[in-house]
Image: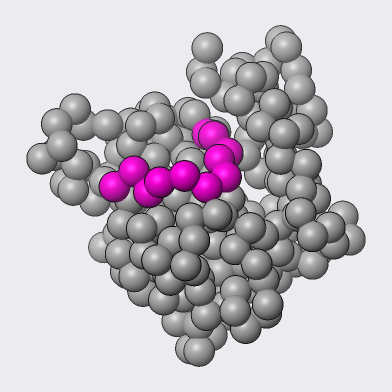
Amino acid sequence: MSEAGIALIAGLGNPGERYTKTRHNVGFWYMARLQNQFGVNFSVEKKFRAKTGRFDLHGQDIRVMMPNTFMNRSGESVSPMAAFYRIKPSRVLIIHDELDLPPGTARLKFGGGHGGHNGLRNIACRLGTPGFMRLRIGIGHPGAHRDVSGFVLNTPPSSERQLIEDAIEKSIMVLPDVVSGDFQKAMNKLHTGSVNEHGQNSRRGKSINGD
């Protein structure tokens, strides 16, 4: 695999049935779709405090994980697994919910701040750097900062859930470009155009932004 590519994908969320359908668990929703599409088998790995698996994508061996810690301690799972397999932070992709993007939108980003996201904050702290790839899946914003905690820990209406699932599906379609390290190509597809069932740009298709 290219040293510029992705070797570890971590979907963030909170463990337990109580949180399964909440907005903060978008990272787990992504992993469920990944599991269905690529036949990933997850199993609990206690030393990483996570459910882990692996799959092959176009000849590239990809490790995946869902932390069993709560969101604000996600780094306690991500960092040990990356260290054990000698995966550089730059080759880690974190899937997380994003308040600053509307439902139906997904954005790739390398590095930067945590934007108040406790999962990203902890991962950056544990890895010792913010220099990792993020897939930001929009969930919208409640409007007032004081309402954020309740908002992310609540279930979105079915119409919003469908938009989020659509964004997840289109994000997975560009995954081959992401894991190969062709981030610009993936961003061009995801950010500025739509992606059809073959993972290709389609000007006639519905935009990832819902435009």
Looking at the picture, tell me which residue is in the foreground, 66 or 92.
92
The residue that appears at 65% across and 67% down in the rendered structure is 88
How many marks overall?
0
Q: Is residue 4 magenta?
A: no
Q: Is residue 55 above or below residue 101?
A: below
Q: Position of residue 127 (x, y in %)?
A: 49, 68
User: Is any part of residue 36 visible from this angle?
Assistant: no
Residue shown at 58% from the left, 50% from the top: 133
Q: Residue furthest front?
A: 128
Residue closest to the eye, 22 or 74: 74
Residue 115 magenta = yes
Residue occupying image coordinates x 51% and y 18%: 210
Residue found farthest to the bottom: 47
**Quadrant of res 87:** bottom right
In the picture, measured across the screen, residue 175 lies left or right of residue 77, that is right
Q: How is the image coloured?
A: one colour
Position in image of residue 159 (x %, y %): 38, 28
Does residue 2 appear to the left or right of 28 in the view shown?
right
- Residues rendered magenta in the picture: 106-116
- Tell me which residue sits at (60%, 74%) in the image: 82
Quadrant that contains the N terminus: bottom right
Locate residue 107, reporting x and y percent.
54, 34
Instruction: In the rendered view, tell whether residue 207 sits above or below residue 152.
Output: above
User: Which corner quadrant of the image does residue 15 belong to?
Assistant: bottom left
Q: Is residue 209 visible?
A: yes
Question: Which quadrant of the structure image shows residue 195?
Answer: top right
Task: Using residue 62 as the reference point, say whether residue 90 is left or right of it.
Answer: left
Q: Residue furthest left?
A: 146
